[in-house]
Image (cartoon, helix red, strand yellow):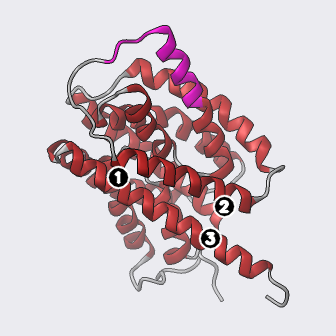
Amino acid sequence: MPSPDEQTVTRTGFPRWATFVLIGLGAGLLSGLFGVGGGTVIVPALVAFAAFDRRMAAGTSLLAIVPTSIVGFLTYGLAGHVSVLTAAILAVGTVIGAQLGTWLLARLSQQVLRWAFVAFVLFVAVQLFFTVPVRGGEVEMTASLVAGLVGLGLATGVLSGLLGVGGGVVVVPAMILLFGYSDLLAKGTSLLMMIPTAISGTIGNLRRKNLDVRAGLFVGLGACVTVTLGSRLAALLDPQVANWLFIAFLVFLMLKTLQDIVKARRSAAPGA
């Protein structure tokens, strides 16, 4: 049986490059709409449709996130929906937190981590349901806000290292709920924050040969086509509607994690 790298047609029936582009189109739309990197879509899609193992899929996804985040950040930035200082503070915390998360990864049960993520997503979704983001206005950068953003960056990095989730899933709702950022400013800033993290991770994966460069470029190309569309759509949507869509996205992630919990439990059962 040929390896994934040798196959010319994926499980979708399309050529490999076309499958990668299609995955990128979907990931880019969600990335622009929600301010997330798109890895929550790219990784399972590469595993399901292109026969990637999860580690290679994660590395390839990180490469695709680099151009996606750049285009998304520029789109939000041109509309004035990016705080460079906030992104820089978050990025510092994220880089440090990711190292701690990687250290904890070898010491904590994956099942415990998955349940913790389900609880976290459920809590955020409930809080967002009763919150209406306020668009417009400025957020004053105070000492307490800086301290809070550093803490948020650290928590985001830890969760990214432990669970492999993109920072936007954590950062966007936290900026809205905890610090009063508008939903558009939170999404644009989140995309900027991801750029240095994704570049750093991609360099590491290249050294470890833990990614498919061609696949990552095709996925990234597809994502760049639709990320601007997602960003524009986010600006056109009513804030409450945008909130509900983000809640639906979080529920999807929660259900997917629950599915992983069930699969892991079945695999661990005697005679599996």
Location of residue 155 in the rendering, given as x and y in whole percent from the top left corner: 61, 35
Q: Is residue 59 above or below residue 269?
A: above
Report the residue marked by disc 1: 246
Q: Earlier in the sequence, mark 1 or mark 3?
A: 1
Q: Amino acid at mark 1?
A: Phe
Select label 1 or label 2 by which is in front: 1
Marks 1/3: CA distance? 21 Å
Location of residue 141 in the rendering, given as x and y in whole percent from the top left corner: 40, 12
Along the horizontal axis of the image, is 62 left or right of 174? right
Q: Earlier in the sequence, mark 1 or mark 2?
A: 2
Q: Earlier in the sequence, mark 3 or mark 2?
A: 2
Where does the magenta region start and end? 139-153
**Principal secondary structure, stretch drawn in magenta:** helix
Location of residue 153 in the rendering, given as x and y in whole percent from the top left corner: 56, 30
Q: Residue at x 37, y 38 (%)?
A: 70
Q: Residue at x 72, y 62 (%)?
A: 111
Q: Is residue 129 visible?
A: yes
Residue 260, numbered label:
3
Location of residue 34 in the rendering, given as x and y in whole percent from the top left corner: 34, 48
Marks 3/2: CA distance? 15 Å
CA neighbours of label 1 inside 10 A, class few (<14), some (14 to 19), many (20+)? many
CA neighbours of label 3 inside 10 A, class few (<14), some (14 to 19), many (20+)? some
The answer to whether residue 140 is magenta is yes
Along the horizontal axis of the image, is 269 left or right of 99? right
Report the residue marked by disc 2: 55
Label 3: which secondary element? helix
Q: Amino acid at mark 3?
A: Asp
